[in-house]
Image (cartoon, helix red, strand yellow):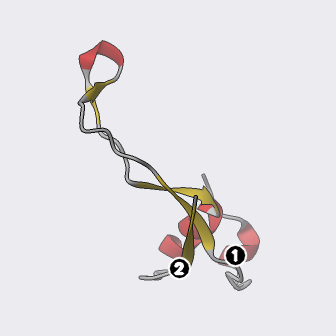
């Protein structure tokens, strides 16, 4: 996903991203053709464009909250 042009043009990243916490299964899971599926412990729920903009702007940290 590409970040919004406004974010890259200097509009501030006002709101924290929302991160969803996942339960990682201890039992191995497999995707198509038997390829092991690597589960994520966290994923971005809201704000993925802000994450991409922060990466492109060279940020090393951004604010986020974990939602249940």
Against 25, residue 23 (above or below) is below
Residue 45 rendering spot, x and y as whole percentages: 60, 56
Q: Which mark is residue 34?
A: none
Q: Residue furthest top?
A: 33
Q: Read off the residue under disc 1.
A: 7
Q: Nearer the viewer, residue 22 or 38?
A: 22
Q: Residue at x 61, y 70 (%)?
A: 17
How many residues crowd mark 1 within 10 Å: few (<14), some (14–19), many (20+)?
Answer: some
Q: Nearer the viewer, residue 49 or 37?
A: 37
Residue 55 placement (x, y as % from top left):
48, 72
* Residue at the spot 60% in from the left edge and 52% down from the top edge: 1
Separation of marks 2 and 1 at Cα, in angstroms: 9 Å
Using the rendered view, name the quadrant where residue 37 is placed.
top left
Question: Does dot 1 land on a helix, a strand or a loop?
Answer: helix
| Residue depicted at 31% across the width and 38% down the height | 25
Q: Is residue 7 left or right of residue 33?
A: right
Corner quadrant of residue 50: bottom right
In this picture, is 38 found above or below 41? above
Q: Secondary structure at mark 2?
A: loop
* Sequence-earlier tag: 2 or 1: 1
Q: Quadrant of the C terminus?
A: bottom right
User: Image check: 67 left or right of 32?
Assistant: right
Give x and y (percent) for residue 22.
44, 50
Q: Nearer the viewer, residue 22 or 56?
A: 22
Q: Quadrant of residue 48?
A: bottom right
Find out whether the residues at labels 2 and 1 contact each other: C-beta distance under 8 Å: yes
Residue at image mark 2: 57
Residue drawn 55% across and 81% down?
Answer: 63
């Amino acid at each position: 996903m590409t970040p919004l042009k406004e974010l890259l043009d200097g509009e501030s990243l006002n709101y924290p991203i929302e991160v969803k916490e996942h339960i990682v299964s201890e039992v191995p899971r497999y995707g198509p053709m038997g390829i092991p599926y690597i589960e994520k412990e966290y994923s971005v729920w809201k704000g993925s464009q802000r994450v991409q903009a922060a990466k492109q702007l060279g940020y090393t940290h951004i604010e986020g909250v974990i939602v249940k």
